[in-house]
Amino acid sequence: MRSLSADEVRWLRVRAQGLAGSAGETGSTGSAGSAARTVPDAVRTAAAVQAQAAGPARLQIWSRSRGLRAADVDAAVAEAAVVRTWLMRGTIHLVAVDDLRAFLAVLGPVNLRADRRRREQLGLTEALCARAMDALAEILAGGRALTRAEIVAELAGHDVVIDLKSQQPPHLLAFAANSGLICRGPDGARDEPTYVLLDGWLGSATAAPPDRESGLTRLAARYFAAYGPATVTDFAAWSGLSGADSNAAVDLVRDSLAEVAYDGRRLLMPHGIEPAPPQCPHRLLARFDPYLLGHRSRELILDPAFAKRVNAGGGMIAQTMLDAGRVVGTWKAGRLEPFQDLPAAGAEAWQAELAAAAAF
């Protein structure tokens, strides 16, 4: 078994994530090393991207693509080439349409079980949720895309009364999404989310949900292509699956994976990928970037002394500066905030990244 250094593990992960070159100029699809030139390809490079908010999701795609602009991301969303719904760890992700059914077949039931107690605490009983599912199918029929407030107002006319200002609406919408009924639709003014019927939104891409084994296979294959070298424990942390389910998924794809050693642990990655010297190491990453969320620990890429600068609490992940796979600072609105003084040689590269982000 080949042993890897920390630098080699970091670089392999950077390359797998499509972060191997300057944003908008070069990139990687995780295998061939070519730049992602479409929004779905950029999304697949990370398996899926976090999409609680539209702005960070656009920038996550910028970091992994070549020649795209923010409007291209919005167009891909509006055309359902990529779709937003609740997936990994019960959070909203943007995923390529051809991966959606497989991911949802595995993660939907997991998320429904994980959120059951909170639904009960909020008064979202099984009977109320069942009525809401029937009502949503009528309310959103005919290709309608409604905001959360509009949905709550119309649900009341179907004997489903919930409080718009409470946590009931998001948990009810998540229930419907994880049940495969709805997903996020096109954004309204100021990026306000709308919701649509999943089958109607996918149109010609609609297909019967795959069996669970096929879903586990697709999920694990996408993960290790995007985040390897990684452990089964890393896969479980990223996906939200149990240890048993994670092991079962990895067993399904194990023949396609190679084992490597790092720091006394066995890591898995696709066969045929060799470490290579880092190139274009200066990168800017969006909030909630998948590079920081794909493994159980960030210590390999982020000095614990600066961890609070990146994640101050509440699940918020700051926009970060990446240098050869290490997080070396944060940034805001065209301003760099490095943890320590930057070498003069890197100043030009960082400014180029800021300019590219602004152009996007």
Image (cartoon, rainbow, N blue to C red):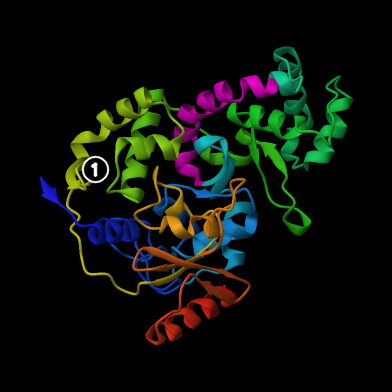
Whole-percent x, y for residue 96 in the image:
48, 47
**Start and end of the magenta stretch?**
95-119
Q: In which quarter of the image is the C terminus?
A: bottom right
- The amino acid at mark 1 is Leu
Q: Is residue 79 left or right of residue 267?
A: right
Asked if the magenta segment contains residue 113, the reply would be yes
Q: In this view, does 304 lie to the left or right of 168?
A: left
> Which SS class for mark 1?
strand
Q: Which of 274 and 5 is in front in this view?
A: 5
Q: Can residue 41 be seen in this view?
A: no
Residue at x 43% of width, y 79% of height = 342
Instruction: Reply above or below: 333 against 184.
Output: below
Residue at x 72% of width, y 47% of height = 193
Q: In which quarter of the image is residue 83?
A: top right
Whole-percent x, y for residue 13 in the image:
32, 56
Q: Is residue 287 left or right of residue 138?
A: left
Whole-percent x, y for residue 148 in the image:
78, 40
Q: Nearer the viewer, residue 160 or 214?
A: 160
Tell me the crowding category of disc 1: few under 14, some 14 to 19, or many 20 or more residues within 10 angstroms, Cα based.
many
Q: Mark 1 points at which residue?
A: 268
Q: Nearer the viewer, residue 274 or 252?
A: 274
In the orientation shown, which residue stands out farthest toward the front? 305
Whole-percent x, y for residue 114 in the image:
56, 24
